[in-house]
Image (cartoon, grey):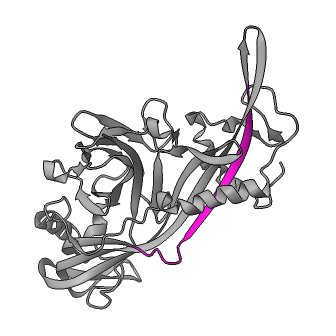
Amino acid sequence: MKRSSMQFALALLRDVAQWAGAGVALCALVAVGVFGCGRMPPEGFWEPTADDSAAIYAWVDSNLSMFSAAFNDDSLRACDTVMPGTTGSRIRNEVRDNPFKQRFRHNALQHVFHEEGHVFKPSFIAVVDTFMTVAAGETTWTQETTATVTVVESLPGELRLKTFSYTKYLRDSMFFPSPGETLILQYYEQAFSPFEYTVRKEFVGAQTDGAVLKKVDGTWQPWKYAGGSRFFAPNPNDAPYVVYAELISKDTTVRVLLRPDTVNYGMQRLYTNEELPTFRVGDSLTFRQSQILTTIGDAAGYVYFQGKRYEFLTSKSDRVPLTEPGVFTIYAVQIPIEVTYEVVGPRLELDPEVSGNYVGTVWGVRVRVVE
């Protein structure tokens, strides 16, 4: 297949092809050319001109905020200390069962994305599809030109946890698993002692998002958007795999799936604005921890919306209020609960600056709010 002067990033074809169920003619793309899905091929081959490529990339550049998952907390904000995993009783059991790990408790946290110098990597696959309509015995062929854009963003940052107590290092314990073999483990006390510091969990992850542009009267215009963005740290294989989540309002429950889905709302399908999950001004939304199917047994869950963080709990105070019309992104964050209380690496007394890496999954679900 020919390539444009800005070169198609076919390595991202797999993600894009999974959106084919949204009605975009990606089955038209084959190794030897561009054809209509079960239709007659257009005459010859078509590829975007330099002007087409420039216009598409210009649109992406002017809409980068739409594709970014950088939902920074502006400060260390208090979190609910009764959340599973931050309670004293839960962590005491962890310490009792395994005193060879250092633990801490926190009462505030902050997500910080290092936006300076981060990289957006847009690519697109443009196709021409040929449609046949038959009316009064007349056959009419029309063409539709679309560009399916994939945007990948590299996002470094850190999770900051305001610590108020921790388990002290006591001594090294020696074990002899076999003759001639010595194992030395650090042993920590089972009581918590005051310790005020900010534990930092570094992360580097990647987010994927996308949209479809349509060429109308010679101008590239947005037509459909991916159901949402997907952020995985440190990578999709190690991050929690979320099968589905349920976005709940007073009158509506929307089941959100990661993969394309023809019944439920699929993150990797493509939707017009009118096809997005739609709610009304005055509604409130929540993701319920009990309504999330994931591969990990216990997780810390947070929701971010328009610069504010909410817990994954069930009370009315944890619902996200919708106060104005428009299309918005609501971010659902899930991290293994151990990230919030386990020290990984050097003891806090030795190196309190950084304590292990962050592991997490973030879904940015697009919703439409109407009057």
Between 357 and 113, the one nearer to me in the picture: 113
Asked whether residue 52 is drawn in magenta, I would say no
Quarter of the C terminus within the rendering:
top left
> Residue 80 placed where, x, y %?
16, 63
Location of residue 131 by image quarter:
top right
Between 341 and 218, the one nearer to me in the picture: 218
Residue at horizontal 43 percent and vertical 59 percent from the top = 239
Q: Residue furthest front?
A: 217
- What's the magenta region? 113-131
Can residue 101 be seen at all in this image of the molecule?
Answer: no
> Residue 206 placed where, x, y %?
51, 63
> Residue 94 placed where, x, y %?
20, 66
Can residue 323 be seen at all in this image of the molecule?
Answer: yes
Between 96 and 214, the one nearer to me in the picture: 214
> Most prominent secondary structure in the magenta stretch?
strand
Residue at horizontal 29 percent and vertical 72 percent from the top = 110
Residue at horizontal 30 percent and vertical 73 percent from the top = 74
State how many labels appear.
Answer: 0
Height in image: 107 above or below 297?
Answer: below
Q: Residue furthest bottom?
A: 350
Height in image: 338 above or below 33?
Answer: below
